[in-house]
Image (cartoon, helix red, strand yellow):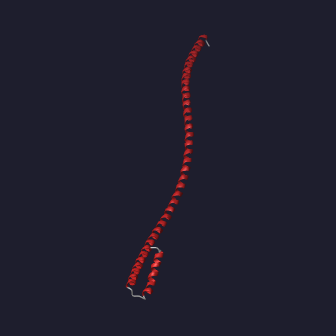
Amino acid sequence: MSKRTIVIILAAVLTLPFIISGCNDSAAQNELADLKAALAKTEGERDNLKSKMNAVAEARDVLQAQVAELTTSRDELQTKVKDLQGQVEALTASRKQLQNDVAGLTESRDAAVAESRDAKTRIDDLTAQLATEKQKVAELQNQLQSVQTAIKELQQKLGF
């Protein structure tokens, strides 16, 4: 019921005893009883609505507290997300630097391997050349020994 209806009913109930006091009409008494019943019903409805309003207010307060809690949680999570994004960016930059370092080290390693291969080839060539030169030295020593032997024989023949 609206407030206007309640006010009209209350006004009627409050003024009715003054109107009825002058007459003992049973219709008026019935109307008074009906108005009292309507007033009791209206008051019951009002009390019921107050109870419902209180329940709604309590539910609203609980929901507002939950909204505040969720807002705080959201803000904390957004802060964590920003921190994690910063870490991701730092790690990405670090990874790129490490990739560049690896590329440089790989290039250096490849150059060192090539240089090592060249050095091994050079060592193998020099080892072969040394073996050849040793053989020549051995032959020359044999020839020298033969020449020295021949010189001694000649000196002995010539008497020196």
Q: Quadrant of the C terminus?
A: top right
The residue under the point 49% across, 64% down is: 67
Q: Position of residue 84 (x, y in %)?
A: 53, 53
Res. 149 image quadrant: top right
> Furthest residue to the right?
160
Q: Position of residue 116 (x, y in %)?
A: 55, 32
Q: Position of residue 16 (x, y in %)?
A: 44, 84
> Furthest residue to the bottom?
22
Q: Nearer the viewer, residue 55 or 120?
A: 55
Res. 139 image quadrant: top right
Rendered view: 109 above or below 17:
above
Q: Nearer the viewer, residue 148 or 62?
A: 62
Rendered view: 65 above or below 6:
above
Q: Quadrant of the N terminus?
A: bottom left
The residue under the point 54% across, 55% down is: 82
Q: Position of residue 32 (x, y in %)?
A: 40, 82
**Left or right of residue 36: residue 141:** right
Rendered view: 151 above or below 58:
above
**Left or right of residue 24: residue 133:** right
